[in-house]
Image (cartoon, rainbow, N blue to C red):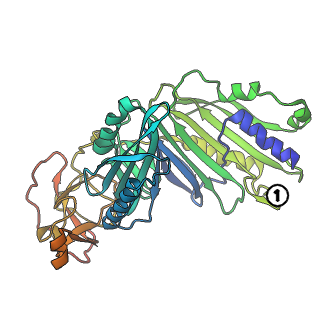
């Protein structure tokens, strides 16, 4: 185990804090969207973990809230907790913003010895998912701009997305979601995903893209060559075998790779492969640092890493296939604007709750003809997002009227496209469909 622990430590010293891995023959693959990039992995790959940070920090997602009514109730309870002083970092609630029923922004502050400190908790519900951003220690001078950006840009452009959905418009893919954005403005972004495989226990493949804050950092091979090794482990280092190393350009990005195998006390070897292309411009979303890693032995049995079921040649083949597939996600030039897209689907197109929105534009549902709908009877929906449920206002009853409380219920509905993004009023189209089961539009 001493040898194994040393190999892991050496990886941490030389490769920087990311050690993941990759997989088998690539005749059958599946494509994933990670940040602003696409990558192909073996079709049987399972997502092991994901992490995403965008502009102001980490964005988490949850599927525990089923509808907008539940979301509103959760936000009301959370607001009460914040007002009661239950914020985890002891910040005080100073304001609440709710530009739409599915967005909440809680403004926070705290007086520190060094002076005032501000923070924010922001939440967005869409398509059965809740996305959250929690940050403290923000710069007071930038605070109002941050709050404004969250309300008017980031959160409204954050939509639910299925793992299999590859958006056609410019933007940033994250777990369960997508942020529509052209990537032309300098900002911080970091996206990472790792995969595991039932047929290759202990193998992990990871992909990461992240904007850079400084140019000229040591490259992968420079770090590997400059890493110091304690004398006590010098002999062990001699047993690390280099399978391949050197420069390697992938889809227009100049990078470096280092493929090594390390020994174990069980007599077999583990794989540690890495390709890396450094970001070429500071805070440039379309030119970030790119990293692909393949590692075996990442799970253990009785304290020993699982023996790889891949040969070295097979491991290299999988690594090469994954690395070669990493490319910036192509986008529809007609969708280059965040707010408009050229008409593709005809007016009158139908789409059910839970399906993928086929066209950016204004949509309505049959319930809007006789009920108040949360968000309005005509709603602006973005292509590739998930078609939402309709939140319908019901009759409040005597006590509801007395207390001024509306009763809302969730309806799975069939939406109809009534106007394109560029239009302010709908053109004539066939009447909205009756609610209830409908056939898919032809």
Furthest residue to the front? 113
Give me the residue at 76% from left, 57% from top: 309
Residue at screen point 61% across, 47% down: 206
Q: Quadrant of residue 440?
A: bottom left
Please give the name of the residue rendered at 59% of the width and 51% of the height, measured from the top-left corner: 194
Given residues 27 and 403, the one toward you in this image is 403
Residue tagged by mark 1?
A: 303
259 is higher (above) or lower (below) than 352: above
Is 252 situated left or right of 171 in this image?
A: right
In the rendered image, which quarter is residue 153 located in? top left
Would residue 184 be visible to someone looking at this image? no
Percent across and percent down for residue 385 are 34, 55
Left-right relation of 348 to 223: left
**Image point (22%, 45%), residue name:** 342
Secondary element under disc 1, as helix, strand or loop, is: loop
The reply, left or right, for residue 365 in relation to residue 298 is: left
**Residue that protrudes farthest toward the top in the picture:** 216
Q: In the rendered view of the protein, which quadrant contains the C terminus?
A: bottom left
Residue 381 in picture, x, y percent from top left = 26, 54
Q: Residues within 10 Å of mark 1 (few under 14, many from 20)?
A: few
């Amino acid at each position: 185990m001493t040898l194994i622990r040393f190999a892991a430590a050496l990886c941490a010293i030389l490769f920087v804090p990311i050690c993941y891995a990759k997989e088998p023959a690539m005749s059958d693959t599946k494509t994933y969207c990670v940040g602003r990039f696409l990558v192909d992995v073996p079709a049987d790959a399972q997502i092991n973990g994901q992490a995403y940070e965008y502009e102001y920090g980490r964005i988490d997602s949850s599927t525990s809230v089923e509808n907008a009514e539940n979301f509103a109730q959760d936000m009301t309870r959370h607001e009460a907790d914040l007002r009661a002083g239950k914020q985890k970092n002891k910040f005080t609630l100073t304001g609440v913003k709710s530009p739409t029923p599915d967005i909440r922004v809680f403004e926070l502050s705290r007086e520190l010895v060094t002076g005032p400190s501000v923070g924010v908790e922001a939440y967005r519900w869409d398509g059965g998912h809740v996305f959250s951003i929690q940050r403290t220690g923000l710069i007071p001078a930038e605070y109002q701009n941050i709050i404004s950006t969250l309300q008017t840009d980031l959160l409204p452009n954050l939509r639910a997305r299925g793992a299999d959905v590859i958006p056609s418009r410019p933007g940033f893919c994250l777990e369960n979601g997508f942020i529509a954005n052209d990537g032309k403005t300098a900002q911080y972004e970091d996206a990472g995903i790792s995969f595991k495989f039932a047929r290759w226990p202990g193998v992990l493949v990871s992909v990461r893209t992240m904007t850079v804050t400084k140019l000229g950092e040591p490259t992968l091979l420079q770090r590997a060559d400059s890493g110091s090794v304690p004398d006590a482990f010098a002999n062990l280092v001699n047993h690390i075998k280099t399978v391949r190393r050197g420069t390697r350009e992938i889809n227009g990005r100049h990078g470096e790779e280092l493929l090594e195998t390390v020994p174990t006390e069980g007599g077999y070897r583990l794989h540690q492969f890495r390709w890396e292309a450094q970001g070429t411009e500071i805070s440039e979303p379309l030119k970030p640092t790119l990293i692909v890693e393949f590692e075996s032995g990442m799970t253990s049995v009785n304290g020993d890493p699982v023996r790889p079921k891949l040969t070295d040649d097979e491991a290299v083949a999988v690594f090469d296939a994954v690395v070669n597939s990493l490319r910036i996600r192509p986008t529809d030039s007609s969708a280059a604007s965040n707010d408009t897209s050229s008409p593709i689907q005809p007016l009158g197109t139908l789409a059910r709750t839970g399906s993928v929105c086929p066209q950016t534009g204004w949509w309505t549902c049959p319930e809007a003809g006789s009920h108040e709908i949360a968000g309005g009877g005509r709603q602006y929906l973005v292509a590739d997002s998930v078609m939402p449920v309709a939140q319908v206002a019901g009759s409040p009853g005597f006590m509801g009227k007395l207390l001024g409380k509306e009763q809302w219920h969730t309806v799975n509905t069939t939406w109809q496209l009534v106007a394109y993004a560029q239009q302010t009023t709908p053109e004539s189209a066939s009447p909205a469909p009756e609610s209830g089961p409908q056939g898919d539009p032809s």
